Amino acid sequence: MKRCMLCCLALLCVWISPPSSVGQSLNEDVLEMKVKGVTMDPQGNTPVVILAEPQGHRAFPIWIGLREARAIVLAMEGVSTPRPETHVLLRNILTDLKVEIVRVVITDIQDNTFYATILLRQEQRTLTIDARPSDAIALALQANVPVFVTRKLLDAVRTVALQEPSSPPLSTKTLGMHVQSLDATLASVFHLASTDGVLVSSVEAGGQAERHGMRRGDVITGVDGKPIRDLQDFLVMRKDKKVGQEIVFQVTRDRSPLVIRLLLSSLD
């Protein structure tokens, strides 16, 4: 909390003081990149965010902290938390102050450390804020603004060739919610001991899952006392249920176990 407040105060101080320099030109030599995802570096067990060309095949990694990885994954999955986390709080403050987040630029790398800037606009004023790439990317995803890299940076880093996945991520919609398979990254983000279970990525407003207390971000680890290892286990469970039956879900929410009972009103 202390770190969060310091970040907010620092940003506000910059906002209310005269800018020391004009923000970066929107026509500078930059390329837009897509946040491809977050994975774990198996050698150092450290989170890595992958930036990739939207229409190309080049990508490069940036090593980040676990908390920033969690923020990026939550934003990409559209998962909200009961209380606003740091990057959501910063976005809300800027929105209330009528400051537009224009874009994020990953600008440089020095001694294996990446540098980034956040371009802000408030009426006729333009500000460029120095930031860590992980914080800048998380804020960009929350504000739905583009992420760019300078051409000199893309030429300086070691890029890798991306290959299209052979199959899309496993997910399905049922019982008024969308669920998807867990991987090592998601398990780390949600502080789970293993990848067993399925993640509730969204819950339909007014649907039967929401009415019985299921929330976005819940991890279903068991059904009717039987463990759920993956999406296939979940689909097998779902196939045998009939309208009028009660389903007992074993769920992990905010690292705490709970039980949700759902009386099946439809098969949708």
Image: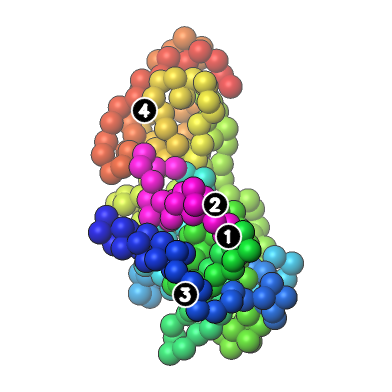
Dot 4 alpha-carbon crowd within 10 angstroms: few under 14, some 14 to 19, many 20 or more: many
- Residue type at the position of mark 3: Asp
Dot 1 alpha-carbon crowd within 10 angstroms: few under 14, some 14 to 19, many 20 or more: some
Q: Which residues are magenta?
A: 80-104
Q: Earlier in the sequence, mark 3 or mark 1?
A: 1
Residue at numbered disc 3: 130
Q: Do tag 2 and tag 1 residues touch (Cβ < 8 Å)?
A: yes
Name the mark on residue 249: 4
Give the image quarter of residue 47. Answer: bottom left
Q: From the viewer's perspective, is 51 left or right of 86?
A: right
At mark 1, the secondary structure is strand
Residue at numbered disc 2: 98
Q: Position of residue 105 (x, y in %)?
A: 58, 72
Q: Earlier in the sequence, mark 4 or mark 3?
A: 3
**Quick one: quadrant of the C terminus?**
top right
Q: Position of residue 68 (x, y in %)?
A: 40, 62
Residue 96 belongs to magenta span: yes
Mark 2–mark 3 distance (CA, rounded to whole Å): 20 Å
At mark 3, the secondary structure is strand
